[in-house]
């Protein structure tokens, strides 16, 4: 279930875009590995939905955003 890129998050100095999420960490990691194989930076984070349900979000991107001087 792919969702459009809406949310962004700063992780390790890079800005990542929200791709999709899985219910289990292993599934999320498998998907992130698949993304990485295609040359995209992918990170997995543990998130809580507004209803309190835990899921594992996959963040794509990793273009460093230059700070304005």
Image (cartoon, helix red, strand yellow):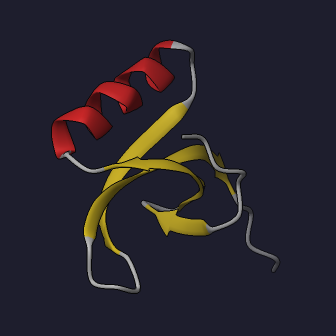
Q: Is residue 51 above or below residue 35?
A: below
Q: Is residue 56 above or below residue 25?
A: below
Vertical position of residue 68 compared to residue 59: above or below? below
In the picture, which quadrant includes the N terminus? top right
Q: Residue at x 60, y 41 (%)?
A: 2
Quarter of the picture holding the C terminus = bottom right
Q: Is residue 35 left or right of residue 65?
A: left
- Residue at x-position 57% and y-position 19%: 39
Residue 40 position in % (x across, y down): 57, 28
Q: Residue furthest right?
A: 68
Residue 61 sits in quarter: top right
Q: Quadrant of residue 33?
A: top left
Rendered view: 24 above or below 46: above
Q: Position of residue 26 (x, y in %)?
A: 17, 35
Position of 64 with respect to 24 (left or right) is right
Is 26 left or right of 2, judged from the image as shown?
A: left
Q: How many marks?
A: 0
Q: Residue 57: x percent and y percent?
A: 40, 55
Residue 62 in the image: state x and y as whole percent: 58, 46
């Amino acid at each position: 279930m792919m969702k459009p890129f809406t949310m962004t998050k700063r992780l390790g100095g890079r800005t990542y875009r929200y791709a999709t999420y899985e219910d289990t960490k292993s599934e999320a990691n498998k998907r992130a590995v698949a993304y990485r194989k295609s040359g995209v930076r992918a990170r997995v984070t543990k998130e809580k939905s507004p209803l309190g349900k835990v899921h594992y979000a996959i963040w794509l991107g990793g273009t460093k955003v230059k700070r304005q001087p």
